[in-house]
Image: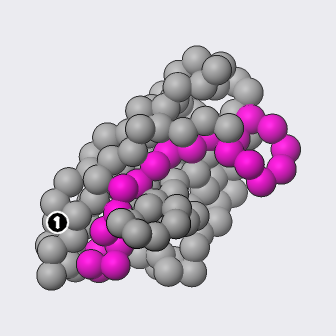
Amino acid sequence: QVQLVESGGGLVQAGGSLRLSCAASGRTFSVLRMGWFRQAPGKEREFVADIVWPGGRTSYADSVKGRFTISRDNAKNTVTLQMSSLKPGDMAVYYCAAKTRPGDRYDYWGQGTQVTVSS
């Protein structure tokens, strides 16, 4: 089992920045990749960014490239999503996720943290 706890959500004005953190605990040695997803009201959950664990290779959704940065601290078992130039369209509940098996499926999810962007 891997437990994930997000923090750092909140209210920010359009154009502002916000940093989300995800702390992993439990069987963290089994984690292959960690990612961030988001879900806006009435929409499906979508991929935002992910990072190979512990290697560090990253990938991003086109909608956030150049604005969001995902990073990890292996020693602290945390992954961070630095969000800049936020837009109202970025408003959603953001979820941290961990993958422990090969393939596309993420096995573990955090409880989510709300990001609200005011225009």
Give me the residue at 28% from left, 59% from top: 115
Query: In this image, 105 relative to 37: left or right?
Result: right
Q: Nearer the viewer, residue 112 or 84?
A: 112
> What x and y, as percent, mark residue 43?
46, 70
107 relative to 25, above or below = below
Query: In this image, 25 relative to 52: left or right?
Result: left
Q: Which segment is the magenta one?
A: 86-106
Q: Nearer the viewer, residue 46 or 2?
A: 46
Query: In this image, 17 relative to 46: left or right?
Result: left
Give me the residue at 41% from left, 75% from top: 67
Amino acid at pointer 1: Val
17 relative to 57, above or below = below
User: Does the magenta-highlighted stretch encompass residue 101?
Assistant: yes
Give me the residue at 47% from left, 75% from top: 64
> What x and y, as percent, mark residue 29?
70, 24
> What x and y, as percent, mark residue 37?
51, 57
Q: Dot 1: what SS?
A: strand
Residue beneath disc 1: 12
Give me the residue at 21% from left, 70% from top: 117
